[in-house]
Amino acid sequence: MRSTCPISQTLDILGDRWTLLVIRDLMFVGKSQYGEFLNSPEKISTNILAERLKRLETSGIIEKRAYQSNPPRYEYKLTQKGSDLRPLIREITKWGIENLKDTKIPVFLSKKPD
Amino acid sequence: MRSTCPISQTLDILGDRWTLLVIRDLMFVGKSQYGEFLNSPEKISTNILAERLKRLETSGIIEKRAYQSNPPRYEYKLTQKGSDLRPLIREITKWGIENLKDTKIPVFLSKKPD
């Protein structure tokens, strides 16, 4: 039986480092295309990226739009439900900066103190 | 090379649903012993639980104390660094309640509106 705990259910969708790194890239780094996500310093693999984008779309957190038809190419953006993850990502960032060594405030975050 | 991004580094430690469910149990449900974590509705397996407890201890998020010596038995509690995860867990909960169907505000959270 599925837990009704909101923490457990949220983690069913987001409880995976790669998923949240894709959301970080969409939310703060201004990335939207497949190749851009692949170029992040954490080096996500293509099969994990494809699976996570599909899962985020199914969950209603991102949506995709074709910007080229032949060959088909898509760009991704956060829905409102996805944008609502901002306070959560901000708390992750804050805890990391305050508690882990060798973290730097990323340029994309220092520009957006909000 | 390891990313200096605080989001990435935090997810290296926490980016896994089981880890955060153990922290939930410690923080809000008042659990502290091995067998108590095993009894949560999500049914974590013993080998995953043992690995996650070890990792959380290594990361300085929890500490363990022997409460019985023969056979040895331990109880676990959050350190200050672990307690500082409270705002993050709260944002996870809030997003889940607002965005996912079939979530209920858990009794342990409704008792602690803070």
Image: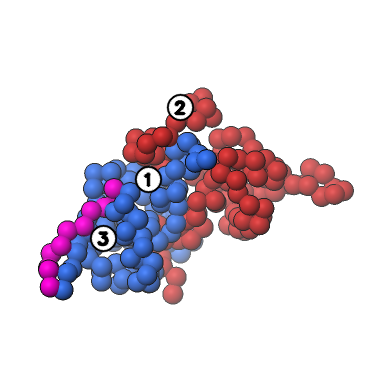
Chain colours: A red, B blue
Q: Quadrant of the C terminus of chain A?
A: top left
Report how far apart the C-alphas of labels 3 and 1 lie in the structure: 16 Å
Q: Quadrant of the N terminus of chain A?
A: bottom left
User: In the visual, does A69 lie left or right of B6?
Assistant: right
* Residue A76 image offset from top left, x and y in percent: 67, 45
Q: Residue at x 39, y 39 (%)?
A: A96
Q: Which residues are magenta?
A: B60-70
Q: Looking at the rendering, which quadrant does residue A30 occupy? A: top right
Q: Which residue is mark 3?
A: B29
Q: Looking at the image, can residue A29 be seen?
A: yes
| Farthest residue, direction top | A111
Secondary structure beneath dot 1 equals: helix
Report how far apart the C-alphas of labels 1 and 2 lie in the structure: 17 Å
Mark 2 belongs to chain: A
Q: Which residue is mark 1?
A: B88
Secondary structure beneath dot 2 equals: loop
Question: Do discs 1 and 2 belong to a common subunit?
Answer: no
Residues B52 and B16: in front is B52
Report how far apart the C-alphas of labels 3 and 2 lie in the structure: 33 Å
For the residue carrying disc 3, how many other residues have a C-alpha within 10 Å: few (<14), some (14-19), or many (20+)? some
Mark 3 belongs to chain: B
Mark 1 belongs to chain: B
For the residue carrying disc 2, how many other residues have a C-alpha within 10 Å: few (<14), some (14-19), or many (20+)? few
* Residue A38 image offset from top left, x and y in percent: 65, 45
User: In the visual, does A49 lie left or right of B56?
Assistant: right
* SS majority, magenta: strand
Q: Residue at x 29, y 67 (%)?
A: B37
Q: Residue at x 38, y 58 (%)?
A: B19
Residues B1 and B9: in front is B1
Q: Which residue is mark 2?
A: A113
Amino acid tagged 3: Val
